[in-house]
Image: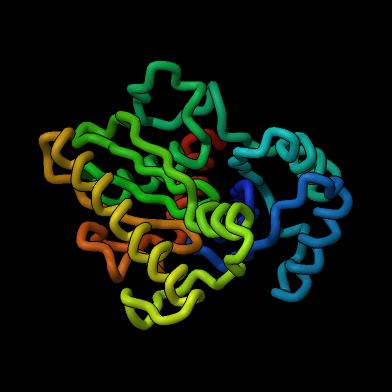
Amino acid sequence: MLLVIDVGNTNIVLGIYDGHRLLRDWRISTDKAKTSDEYGILIRELFRSAGIDFKDVRAIIISSVVPTLSGVLERLSRNYFGYCPIVVGPGIKTGMPIQYDNPKEVGADRIVNAVAGYEKYKTSLIIVDFGTATTFDYVNRKGEYCGGAIAPGLVISMEALFQRASKLPRVDIVKPPVVIARNTVNSMQAGIFYGYVGLVDEIVTRMKAESKDTPRIIATGGLAGLIAPESKTIEAVEEYLTLEGLRILYERNRE
């Protein structure tokens, strides 16, 4: 079995693959203060609840945008599983040319998503990933990563509004019943939700025009399912895109 680990600024997503089949996945909070032992105990409990034996894991691949946790999870891999993990970064075989001024600046998660998306659709793509930040990435028809845009994530936007405006409460991120709201909570939800739908559609529309192509528009990330139904541009939600990308990169680098 293959253990894939995607480390984001807010959440760590783990998945267990048996060949090409995803058996289980989990989402846990990212905690920079946790040690490799603490993460090891937590993952062991997750495995136990799913009836999976640590000994069944034969390989591990990690993608991380949190540098301080990369070493922690590498130690976890060696100490708890007995394997040195593959870490997505410079030198890894992606099979995808990176057309970026400095390829080392591209977040590992963006490359992983691009690889998975192109592997599935085999055409030009715009990938919208709703994470701590929302990223927009363009892959051309030749399978080259061409760059994209980065915007503050939905949760960041809501937290900034709560923290900087003294009289505004913290509210849940949900689709509000109306846009012309008659209370503060719904007013905030309308502004954040529909404002964000507009942000997504505007950036995607401009990227499509700039690409001079008709790319497929796909979305992933924790809040993709909330925003996509209201978007005029997003065509499909790929819930496990990053995990699939990690599996594909493992296959390309397993030797």
- Asked where in the image residue 27 lies, by quadrant, the reply is bottom right
Residue 72 x/y as whole percent: 79, 40
Taking 233 as reference, is 213 above or below it? above
Q: Is residue 243 visible?
A: no
Q: Residue at x 45, y 54 (%)?
A: 130
Outermost top residue: 101
Taking 16 as reference, is 214 above or below it? above
Taking 214 as reference, is 42 above or below it? below
Q: Residue at x 48, y 46 (%)?
A: 152
Q: Is residue 8 left or right of residue 149?
A: right
Q: Is residue 107 left or right of residue 52?
A: left
124 or 133: nearer the eye? 133
Q: How is the image coloured?
A: rainbow
- Asked where in the image residue 74 lies, by quadrant, the reply is top right
Residue 216 x/y as whole percent: 21, 51
Residue 50 x/y as whole percent: 70, 74
Q: Is residue 199 visible?
A: yes
154 or 169: nearer the eye? 169
Residue 1 x/y as whole percent: 62, 56
